[in-house]
Amino acid sequence: MNAPWQPLLEWWFGHSESPNEVAAQKGKLWFGKRDSQDLEARKRFGAQVEQALAGGLTEWAQRPEGWLALVLLLDQLPRMIFRDSPQAYSGDIRAQVLVAQGIAADFDGQLPPIQRVFIYLVFEHCENLALQNEGVSRHIELLAQQPESDQALFADYLNYAEKHQKVIAQFGRFPHRNAVLGRESTAQELEFLSRPGSRF
């Protein structure tokens, strides 16, 4: 009998063991913004997202794979299902707590490298410089552990972590979230948002 989190992990990561193949197959799902993908996430996993946001499914966090899936339900899928609304970020705090607990138990070290990226991505989503710094450190460590064939892929993930870190170091928050969260942007933030690539 399959674990309850298996369908989500298969949808998110597929079946290949090669990080480059997984990224090639799933990159558009992970980082693309498509209505069809958001709708599929809502139809297939919306009920589990609601459970996770309500504080449920805690038993999943007893194993590395279930822990990863619960993190996805709190961090990644709300950004799809509730895109462009405050609810997109409603699982962030719980995801941060969950990630800290799992890392303390070395759950991340028991996951394949490409899956660890989505644990450390929680740090990138934080409007907190200390957590951003930890995310960059984790990506540096992850890159150092990869064979030469995978170095370019994980260097790219580190590059994005550093970009997020720089924004928080400069503004203390992500300016591109201001409109959705009803926050007033400063003149400096508006100037920043006018630049290409300022919106993750």
Image: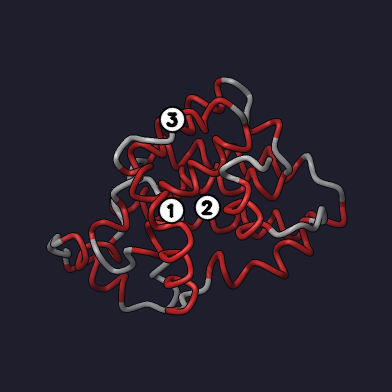
The residue depicted at 38 percent of the width and 40 percent of the height is: 129
Q: Residues within 10 Å of mark 1 (few under 14, many from 20)?
A: some
Provide the residue designation for mark 3: 58
Badge 3 marks a residue whose secondary structure is: helix
What label sits on residue 162 in the rendered view?
A: 2
Name the image quarter holding the C terminus: bottom left
Looking at the rendered image, the disc whose residue lies closer to the viewer, 3 or 2, is 3
* Residue 194 or residue 109, whichever sits in front: 109
In the orientation shown, which residue stands out farthest toward the front? 1
The residue at which mark 1 appears reads as 166
Number of the front mark, 1 or 3 = 3
| 25 relative position to 39: left or right | right
Q: In terms of image quadrants, where is residue 103? A: top right
- Across and down, in percent, residue 24 comes to 72, 69
The image quarter in which residue 85 lies: bottom left
Q: Amino acid at mark 3?
A: Thr
Comparing 75 with 8, the one in front is: 8
In the rendered structure, which disc, 1 or 3, sits on the residue that comes first in sequence? 3
Q: Residue at x 57, y 43 (%)?
A: 4
- Dots 1, 2 in contact, CB < 8 A: yes
Q: In whole angstroms, how far apart are the C-alphas of marks 3 and 2? A: 31 Å
Secondary element at image label 1: helix
Residue 159 placement (x, y as % from top left)? 59, 57
How far apart, in angstroms, are the residues tagged by discs 1 and 2?
Answer: 6 Å
Horizontal side of 81 relative to 121 (left or right) equals: left
Type of amino acid under label 1: Lys
Of labels 3 and 2, earlier in sequence is 3
* Image coords of residue 73 (percent x, y): 45, 49
